[in-house]
Image (cartoon, helix red, strand yellow):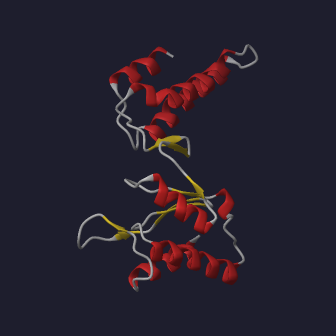
Amino acid sequence: MEALTGVMKKACDIGVFEGLRLSPNGAQISHFLYADDVIFVGEWSFNNLLNLKRILRCFYLSLGLKVNLKKSSLYGVGLEDNPVQLMANMTGCVRGSFPFKYLGLQVGANMNLIKNWDLVVETFQKRLALWKAKTISFGGRITLVNFVLNALPTYYFSLFKAPLGVIKKLEKI
């Protein structure tokens, strides 16, 4: 994945791939990595997508790591469905739609709405329901509750500010 990062940085530097700029003279963001998952972000254009497909082909030929385009999704932010579907068909990807779930988080959902936190609340309920089992010792229950109450909020709340109603639900659980 370090090699892919290097290739994408070079592609952005020489203008082969146009990532997103946070400010006019700021750095370009072309991708996000988590383990072996990659999210590519860039300007919406036929050439940009074609060049990304070429970069991935060269990546495969040089390192042997092939991207399964049939498992990949293409999203167009602020675009009609037709151009997104057309480009998805051209690349062999599936057209994705918002919101979608990535690493357990809703992407593209309005996280100010309590209903969009249902997945987080369910995760808390499932994890804490385990401690109700009579086979876990008192110390084991304390460890499990500490894990859930420390690790999960750090993960979810690092990106989104939870509405007060969600905090109350989690405290009740």
State the image coordinates of residue 52 (x, y, percent, origin top left). Answer: 53, 74
| Residue at the outermost bottom position | 14
Q: Quadrant of the N terminus?
A: bottom right
State the image coordinates of residue 29 (x, y, percent, origin top left). Answer: 39, 67
State the image coordinates of residue 124 (x, y, percent, origin top left). Answer: 55, 26
On the rendered structure, is 145 left or right of 170? Answer: right
State the image coordinates of residue 36 (x, y, percent, origin top left). Answer: 63, 61
Q: Between 65 and 128, which is closer to the camera in this rendering?
A: 65
Look at 55% across and 41% down and name the residue there: 104
Look at 51% across and 31% down and name the residue there: 120
| Residue at the outermost left position | 24
Does 66 sit above or below residue 155? below
| Residue at the outermost right position | 135
Q: How many marks?
A: 0
On the rendered structure, is 87 left or right of 162? Answer: right
| Residue at the outermost front position | 82
Q: Between 77 and 162, which is closer to the camera in this rendering?
A: 77
Q: Between 7 and 130, which is closer to the camera in this rendering?
A: 7
Look at 64% across and 78% down and name the residue there: 57
Look at 34% across and 36% down and name the residue there: 161
Does 60 sit above or below residue 70? below
Does 164 sit above or below residue 32? above
